[in-house]
Image (cartoon, rainbow, N blue to C red):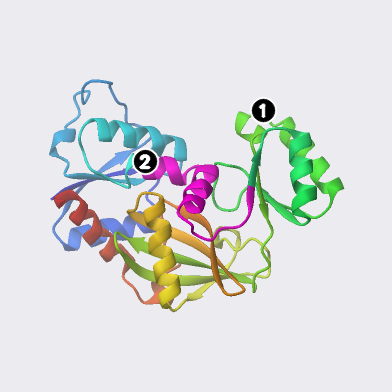
């Protein structure tokens, strides 16, 4: 078995994955995304043929997006697949996939102008949440509580330049018990779940949230599997929030980060991850 690991930096997760592969006598070739280049109709002299599967661990969504498509063109299985990257890397597409599969998710609107955004917010009722359609780690998210705040944020976005800032992704604000939930799905199994605890309305660990184990009840297990399947399946992290009567799925992540989740859950996520990658290569 020979795994290619496409990476940006060797963080703790990548170190753990490399160690888990070493313990199984699995060869891993590290492929730094800064250095890689692709040809349209060849492997560009690279010995890609020796790889049984490529594991994508890029920090940049755009690099993952194009690299996975090229590896797919070359006939090499990938974790995750290009289509999963495409779907999960765009929050609008993720929301559409969840809604079309009747998975509970916050009320969401996509609009393309300042006036339309203000109209949606007024009708939805403050507070609302505005997010970039592409982004992670809670960056550039805004909880908008008044029309004046909305006007100010929309003005700032209008001068940022990137075309993505002219696509306004607006969600209802969900009151939650100072925590949300992340579950980890590998294929057809939910392997672990965590609470991300914070007094701040954004509960990302990148912004300081603390982590504790979340027991997986039947509803949480089933909903996580359905959400993963809705975006194409694979190695997926599902972000959920507790609401009256159950859960709602907020986001779906295709490059799962788990360094803060092994200790509180007691689950050897890197080992299970490597086992899943091997199963993809053999399928």
Find numbered disc 1 in the image and state the secondary structure of the residue it sits on: loop
Residue at the farthest right position: 148
Task: Check residue 84 for magenta coloring.
Answer: yes
Of badges 2 and 1, the one in the foreground is 2
Relative horizontal placement of residue 105, taking residue 219 as reference (left or right)? right
Q: Residue 43 carries which label?
A: none
Residue 72 on image: x %, y %:
26, 35
Range of residues picked out in magenta: 83-108
Q: Is 46 placed above or below 282 here?
A: above
Residue of label 1: 161
Residue 152 on image: x %, y %:
82, 41
Q: How many marks?
A: 2
Residue placed at 36% from the left, 62% from the top? 185
Residue 259 in sight in this render: no
Q: Residue 83 carries which label?
A: 2
Relative horizontal placement of residue 211, taking residue 274 as reference (left or right)? right
Q: Which of marks 2 and 1 is nearer the N terminus?
A: 2
Q: Residues within 10 Å of mark 1 (few under 14, many from 20)?
A: few
Residue placed at 79% from the left, 35% from the top? 115
Residue 131 on image: x %, y %:
64, 47
Task: Check residue 208 for magenta coloring.
Answer: no
Residue placed at 67% from the left, 28% from the top? 161
Residue placed at 33% from the left, 33% from the top? 69
The quarter of the picture where residue 220 lies is bottom left
Q: Which of 136 and 236 is in front in this view?
A: 236
Query: What is the chief secondary structure element of the magenta stretch?
Result: helix
């Amino acid at each position: 078995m020979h795994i290619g690991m496409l990476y940006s930096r060797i963080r703790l997760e990548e170190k753990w994955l490399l160690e888990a592969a070493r313990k199984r006598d699995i060869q891993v070739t590290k492929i730094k995304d800064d250095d890689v280049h692709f040809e349209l109709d060849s492997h560009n002299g690279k010995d890609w043929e020796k790889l049984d599967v490529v594991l994508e661990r890029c920090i940049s969504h755009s690099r993952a997006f194009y690299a996975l498509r090229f590896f797919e063109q070359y006939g090499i299985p990938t974790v995750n697949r290009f289509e999963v990257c495409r779907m999960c890397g765009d929050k609008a597409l993720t929301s559409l996939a969840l809604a079309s599969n009747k998975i509970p998710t916050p009320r969401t609107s996509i609009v393309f102008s300042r006036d339309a955004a203000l109209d949606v917010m007024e009708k939805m009722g403050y507070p609302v949440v505005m997010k970039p359609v592409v982004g992670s780690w809670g960056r550039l998210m805004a909880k908008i509580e008044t029309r004046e705040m909305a006007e100010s944020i929309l003005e700032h976005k209008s001068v940022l330049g990137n075309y993505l800032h002219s696509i306004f992704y607006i969600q209802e604000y969900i009151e939650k018990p100072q925590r949300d939930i992340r579950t980890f799905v590998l294929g057809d199994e939910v392997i672990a779940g965590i609470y991300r605890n914070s007094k701040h309305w954004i509960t990302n660990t990148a912004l300081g949230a603390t982590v504790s184990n979340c027991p997986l009840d039947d509803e949480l297990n089933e909903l996580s599997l359905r959400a993963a399947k809705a975006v194409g399946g694979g190695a997926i992290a599902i972000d959920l929030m507790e609401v009256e009567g159950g859960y709602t799925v907020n986001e779906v992540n295709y490059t799962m980060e788990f360094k803060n989740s092994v200790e509180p859950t007691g689950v050897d996520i890197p080992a299970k991850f490597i086992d899943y990658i091997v199963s993809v290569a053999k399928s």
